[in-house]
Image (tube, rainbow, N blue to C red):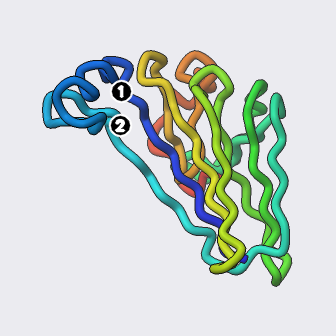
Amino acid sequence: MNLHLHFILVNSEFNQGLAEDLYEGEESEDNIKHLWEDELKVSEPIKDFKIRNNATYTLQGFYADNTAFSFEIPEMTVVDSTSTTGTVTQFAVSKKILKKTDKVVDDKNAETHIYFYLRDSIPMENPITGVYIAKQDFPKELKKAPTLTNAK
């Protein structure tokens, strides 16, 4: 099975009433529903995946001077995926910035799409691909740190 993850920043200023009245329910140039979307596809076929709500995510990697770091971030929604070759990959989103989620399974094409709709009203950090952490929960030591490398 192929696993696709979609991280979508929802525009809190989108007006559905305006869209209905003037644009047949669709967004317009001045009334945008989503500000951006990151779509990721796990590079290997997936054997299984698990979504954990209210979990702790461990952000780890190395500072520019090759010193290791590891920080536990609480209150996250974490997706653990295991590929057919045994590779484990994690994706994570702070509960505070998560507006809603959706999962679409396409059995015909052996694909699963997981959608994470993010709030634009809460500042966030995106330290690595597929990880979105509320700025207030992001480790302060990393905010003032020199360039990070190999975060995972």
Percent coordinates x, y for residue 34 in the rendering: 35, 37
The answer to the question of whether label 1 and label 2 lie on touching residues, with beta carbons closer than 8 A, is: yes
Residue at the (58%, 21%) spot, across then down: 140
In front: 46, or 125?
A: 46
Q: Quadrant of residue 137?
A: top right
Please say if 117 is above or below 61.
above
| Residue 131 percent across, percent down from the top left | 59, 44
- Residue 116 placement: quadrant: top right
* Residue 55 vs residue 11, the one in the foreground: 11
Amino acid at pointer 1: Asn
Q: Which three-letter amino acid code belongs to the residue tagged 2? A: His
Residue labelled with disc 2:
34
Horizontally, is 23 left or right of 58 in the view? Answer: left
> In percent of the image, x 73 and y 54: which residue is there?
90
- Report the residue marked by disc 1: 11
In the rendered view, would you say 30 is above or below 109? above
72 displayed left or right of 116 = right
Element carrying mark 2: strand
Within-10-Å neighbours for mark 2: few <14, some 14–19, many 20+: some
Q: Position of residue 84 (x, y in %)?
A: 82, 81
Quadrant that contains the N terminus: bottom right
The furthest residue to the bottom: 85
Disc with the residue nearer the chain's start (1 vs 2): 1
Q: Residue at x 45, y 44 (%)?
A: 147
Circle 1 SS class: loop
Seen in the picture, residue 82 relative to 18 is either above or below; the reply is below
The CA span between labels 1 and 2 is: 5 Å
